Amino acid sequence: MILSFLKQYYKSIIIGIMILWLSLSENDAINPGNIFNIPNADKAGHFVAYMFFSAVLMLDSGRWQRTMRFKYQLLIIPVLLGALMELFQRLLTQMRQADWVDMIADLVGIFFGLMIAIAAKKLLRSDS
């Protein structure tokens, strides 16, 4: 059962671990705002990370060969991860800080990730 879960969701798990690492890393060099010298660029990073995470999570849950149905309740995972990362940044790191605007960027990214997964599902279904 665990092996089956890992086999189905390994891409989502890897992305979740990457978000965890990026969120709690004390290395300020990975901040997109520092790389491109753009104010609030980290919000775009939050948006893209959670969009990608939720799209892959939905596509992983689809079991394309069998039912083509999403498990929408799984979207609670990126929502909780985003909230926990903001809390952990406040409590566990010194170089990072919690920001409610980051959480909004996460939520908007999750919504757009769902839209991408729905569009991908329709495209894959039309090809079959």
Image: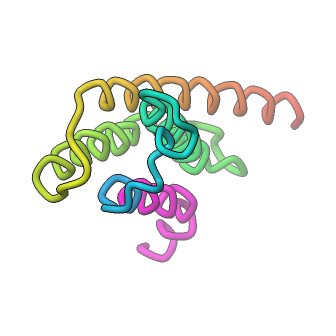
In the depicted structure, whether residue 119 falls above or below residue 24: above
Q: Quadrant of the N terminus?
A: bottom left
The extreme front residue here reads 37
Residue 112: give x, y in percent of width and height.
54, 24
Identify the image quadrant of residue 92: bottom left
Residue 69: give x, y in percent of width and height.
58, 37
In the depicted structure, whether residue 123 falls above or below residue 71: above
Residue 87: give x, y in percent of width and height.
16, 45
What is the magenta segment's predominant secondary structure?
helix
Q: Residue at x 23, y 39 (%)?
A: 83
Identify the image quadrant of residue 94: bottom left
Residue 66: give x, y in percent of width and height.
67, 49
Residue situated in front as seen by the camera: 33 or 8: 33
Q: Left or right: where does residue 91 sit relative to residue 93? A: left
Q: Residue at x 42, y 62 (%)?
A: 17
Q: Quadrant of the C terminus?
A: top right
The extreme left residue here reads 91
Residues drawn in magenta: 1-20
